[in-house]
Structure formats: C-alpha cells, structure tokens
Amino acid sequence: MTLTIDRNAIDGLKAQIVLSDVIGQSVRLNRSGTWMLGLCPFHEESNPSFAVKDIDGRYVCFTCGAHGDIFDWVAHTDNLDPKADFLKVFRRVQDIAGDHSVATALPQHDTAMRGEKIKTDTEERRQKAIRHWRKGRPIEGTKAETYLRDCRGIRTVDFSGMPFRFIDDHERWIWCDQLKKPVMVGRWPCLLTAIQEVVPNADGKHRFLALHRTWFELGNPKNPQGKVKITYTEPGGKVRKIARKKIDGDWFGRGAIMLTGAGEVQATTEGIENGLTALELGPYKHVWVSVSLNAFATMPLLPVTRRLVIISDSDSKSRRDALMHQEQLTGAMHRQRLDHNVDVDLKPAPPGYDLNDWHLKQLLHHALATGQ
Ligand SMILES: [Zn+2]
C-alpha cells in the first residue's frame, strides 16, 4: 500500500522536536546566540562551521552547504533515502517526537509513492508561491513604494524591472501547534519579492524558485520604519512573536533576489532593504540579495563576475553573535573564492548597524540639520 502524509502533519511533528537535542546526540554542539555550533558531520573540518537553529528547526553547514531539517537529518543518520524511504524516515521522526497521532490515520489515505509526493509537495509550494506572486501588482504608486521610499529611505532607485510586487491587506498565516492547523493572524500590506534561479535556463530566463514576503505598516508614528509587529495569542494564552517576513519555496544554494543583472563587480547583501540601500548609496551597480547569512557561501555567481563584494550586517546583539557572524562570513568568502574563482571583499556596515539602518540614521541627521 502506498500512503500520503499531510504537510501539516510534517510541520506539526517538526514543531515538537528540538533539533539540537537530536543532533547533539552525535555532534558536540555549543550555544552561540540563537545558534548551536559544532564540527560539521558532513565534511572534515577543525573549526566549527556547522550550525543548528532550533527556532527554524534547521541545520546548515556554511562551508560545505549541507542543510536540512529533522527529516533530512534522520535520513542521513539512518542511511535512508529521504525521498524513497520517506515513510521509514517519517516513522523514525514520530518515534523521536513521541507522537504517533498521524500514523493511525495514515491507512485511510491512498495515493502515490511518498518520494513522488515530496517532489509534488515542493512543486506545489512553488506553484502556490507563484499564485501569490500573480495576485500582486507592480509596486509603482502603491504602499510598497511608499514603504521603501519613505520608511526605508530608498529615494532614487528605479524599481522598474526589479522582482517586486505588492498585495494590499495580505493575510499572514501561521501554524498553531495546539490547534494542529494553520491560523490567520492578521492582514497587512505586503511587499512580494521573487527569489529566482541565478543560472538561467536555455531560453535565458531565470526560473521563479521561491517567494519572499515582507509585511509592513504605514502611518504608525511610533514605527517610522514600517516594521509591523505581529503576535499570536495561543489558545493557552501564551503570546507568540510572529516573523514579518516569510519565504516559501526551495531556493537555497540556487537562488537570489536579483535586483539587477550580473556584473563584473557583484555586490550582495543579506536583506532586501540593504540591497536597495547599496544601490541608493553606490558605487555598486549590480546587487543581489542572498536572502540569508548562510546563503552568502552558496549563492551562485555568473561567469561575468570577477569580484564579489559581501556587504554584511554589523548589528549582532552580542559579542558571541558577532564572532559567530564573522566566522560565517569568513567561511562564505573562502567558499566563494574556491567555487567561482573570484576575488571576494567584505564591506561590513558601520558597527551597530545594518546598511539600511545606518542610511536612515544619516537621513535623519541630515533632516535635523537642515530643518527639512
Ligand atoms: Zn560541512
């Protein structure tokens, strides 16, 4: 008999597991801010570049690029194929979580092989992301343009041709553990950004891989940067902070937010607002957003690029975080040099800031000084 497993069941199981507890049984991990760090079990190394983030339920090695969730980890440790042996992997994860609530319901479903199902799931998520994307409209003249220009100080950059769209009153859904179902926590204006495959396909197009969404608010005098605070009160009364940014789709190691075409000197930032600030302030003409710190190491480059400039954030909350951040950047520079035979420069934002924060502070100083 072949079976299918609901996406919600998978997410529900993941939420019950502290990934670092599981990985910590075979890899010695040390806490560093929100990360747990250790020697990578996927490649030989003497300095730790393997990180586990329990909040996201994911691990990543910023040297070899190995990454995944509890399902990938179990498949790796039990020497199983994450797709073909999915049901075995799933049962192992259930054992770890001590939750077999889904298993009893399983035989009622009867569809295709699980391996195929995962492929379909990934493609389904991509298609769902594309449907959101299609609902969006160009950002010129919308609240998204106002957000970028007025809240983020991106005053002169031409947004036309950039992979941006806008949806007003866009719903933010999250997974609720107690209710074991997704719940809608509110609606806000939303900037949609496409994460595209860097290497173009045969007809020169960059495939849509994933959707990045930024919910924001306008007109709150207490929040001039537009960073909307989203919370969810669980049935038990516990208040959860919800991220105002979300990525849907499978893009790691293949994609970037390509604000411009590729250049001989290619600049890259972690976040969208920082990438736009790099264009606003110059001298960079070719800027891509890697989307995350981890992705600096694995973001593909095109052959035209001779030099990569990593514009990093300098807003770590603690000295430990800063050290960890620095190690990741060093790993990323090393890996990019090896993989793409390019020169790599690191241009950190001024201490205490990311590039956009710093830019906003300069604008504020200027406004105060000139009375504008
Ligand atoms: Zn590794």
Image: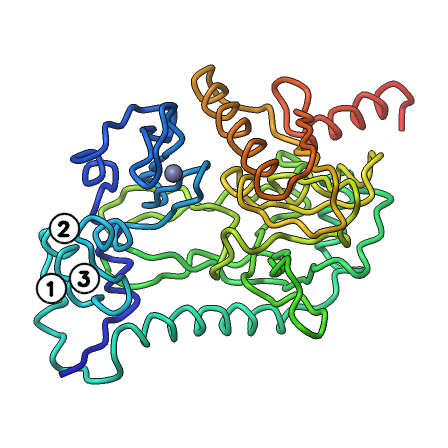
Q: Which residue is mark 2?
A: 97
Amino acid type assigned to the residue bearing label 2 in the image: Ala
Dot 3: element: helix
Q: CA distance from mark 1 to mark 3?
A: 12 Å
Disc 1 element: loop
Residue 139, image x, y percentages: 74, 60
Disc 1 from disc 2: Cα separation: 11 Å
Circle 3 residue: 90
Quadrant of the image occupied by residue 225: top right
Query: Which of the marked residues, 3 or 2, is nearer the chain's N terminus?
Result: 3
Q: Is 12 positioned to the left or the right of 291 in the image? A: left
Q: Front-most of 224 and 182?
A: 182
Is 58 or 276 nearer to us in this picture? 58
User: Residue 349, percent across and down?
Assistant: 67, 25
Disc 3 to disc 2, how far (Cα)?
A: 10 Å
Compared with 144, 51 (above or below) is: above
Q: Are marks 1 and 2 in contact (CB under 8 Å)?
A: no
Q: Residue at x 22, y 39 (%)?
A: 23
Q: What residue did someone put label 1 on? A: 101
- Which one is nearer the viewer's eye here, 23 or 144? 23
Q: Position of residue 170 (x, y in %)?
A: 56, 62
Element class at badge 2: helix
Quadrant housing the C terminus = top right
- 317 w.r.t. 40: above or below: above
